Amino acid sequence: MSRFTIPTVGAPTSVLFPGVQRRRLGGGLRLWAIEHTAVPVVTVTCLVEAGTAIDPPELPGLATLTSALLTEGAGSYDAIELSDALARIGANLSTETGTDTASLTLTTLSKYFDRALAIMADVIRRPRMAAPDFARVRDLRLSRLKQLARTPAAAADRALLSAIYGQHPYGRGALGTTRAAERVTLDDVRACWASAWHPSTAAILVAGDIQPVRALDACEAALGDWVAAGNPPRETPVPVFQQAPDILFVAWPDAPQSEIRAGHGGPARRTGDYPALVALNAILGGQFMSRINRNLREERAITYGARTSFDMRRVGGVYSCEASVQSDATAVALAEVLRETRGIQAEGSITEDELGRAQAALARGYGRHFETAGHLVRAMSELVSYGLPEDTFDRFVPAIEALTPDVVTRTARQFLRPDDSALVVVGDRTRIGTGLESLGRPIAEIAPEF
């Protein structure tokens, strides 16, 4: 083949998710393990139903604060000693808090697996939650909230979620508010940990260079007698999505650009239309060559980039479009986002070629999501978090390849509601001009709380 000849594109590779060995302990704790011998590394995640959805209405941000405090000392280790113990064996321990779940993730060399797991078990079961550590973590939270309060994109995101979810737990900011951070106490954090970090709703997920039986035995020895300190949190209610007839405007004097958002309620992750929704999003705004990005960036040159997404959560998600646009083109950008959203619902709008490009991007790149032990643990976390069938990943590529333009168009009609979308603008009204009125909606000025 000539070096000037572009190679032909081959067929997408099938993805067969590795077999998972499972064990369930008497207290309800689930243990899952996958062997992955590419490198001598093991990743372990403890996943619990302790996401931001469990936050009390008066204390948004409590779940993330609780998770952050876990790695500030545990068992016989204070914060510095814990960090040193992990550093001596080249291990890393981190927390992450989403809307539905929170996780504590350990990455370690295989030869130090037992030592690292013992440390992790201490963090899960015996976090110190000392007053000085709590004060330091809370001060960091307050500083971060001050930073976010000065960020137009953060204001736009908060306004959109609040407009869509109303008082539902999904509508609260993950880091909460300054008012909540100032009133939260160490007792609140300890009570949250006792309730949310509960073996009956937890799963220990292991992947890496270790035999699954040995991994499961070690996890059972370290955590088999884990006893809950409180009752597990209540299930998250199904959201009742809000209608937002106004354009929600956040004044940001002297802003050179406007942050815009458009969105509405969407499906939960377990929807059977998931592959079609992923393809639809890729065509509309989920990739660089998608319709909305080409329109606003390439054709109109009013943004560096615009993107759409379906954030599918356990009991209801959100569809949104976001962009930072030239101030005097704010109204045009919003109008074009809505026009493109309506247009993709039209009969015959999606061509075979357009769908084919999206299918190729999704199917041919799918295997990269399962290359490392960390990837495999994250994939298992998705299965556990949303109660998905064990062959979910095996079926994705065939499902993507089987899509037709008509199926994706029907999906657009079912799940996209441009006329019901909440619209948010953060910017300088004097630079935006009077164009917003042309969208035919009242303009309500708001101030998101940070």
Image (cartoon, rainbow, N blue to C red):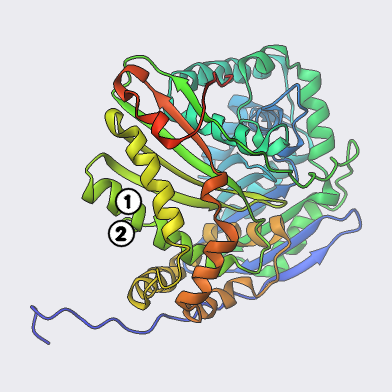
Q: Is residue 282 above or below residue 174?
A: below
Neighbour class for label 1 at 10 Å: few (<14), some, many (≥20)? many
* Label 2 close to label 1 by CB (< 8 Å): yes
Image point 54% across, 55% down: which residue?
416
Q: Nearer the viewer, residue 218 or 361?
A: 361
What's the amino acid at mark 2?
Answer: Met
Percent position of residue 432, x then y: 32, 25
- Look at mark 1 in the image and give the residue it sits on: 293
Percent position of residue 322, x then y: 43, 41
Residue 289 is labelled as: 2
Q: Classify residue 402 as left or right of residue 9.
A: right
Q: Is any part of residue 39 visible from this angle? A: no
Secondary structure under tag 2 reads loop
Q: Is residue 343 above or below residue 296?
A: below
User: Residue 438 is drawn in which quadrant?
Assistant: top left
What's the amino acid at mark 1?
Answer: Asn
Q: Is residue 124 above or below residue 317?
A: above
Q: Nearer the viewer, residue 393 or 268?
A: 268
Percent position of residue 404, x then y: 47, 79
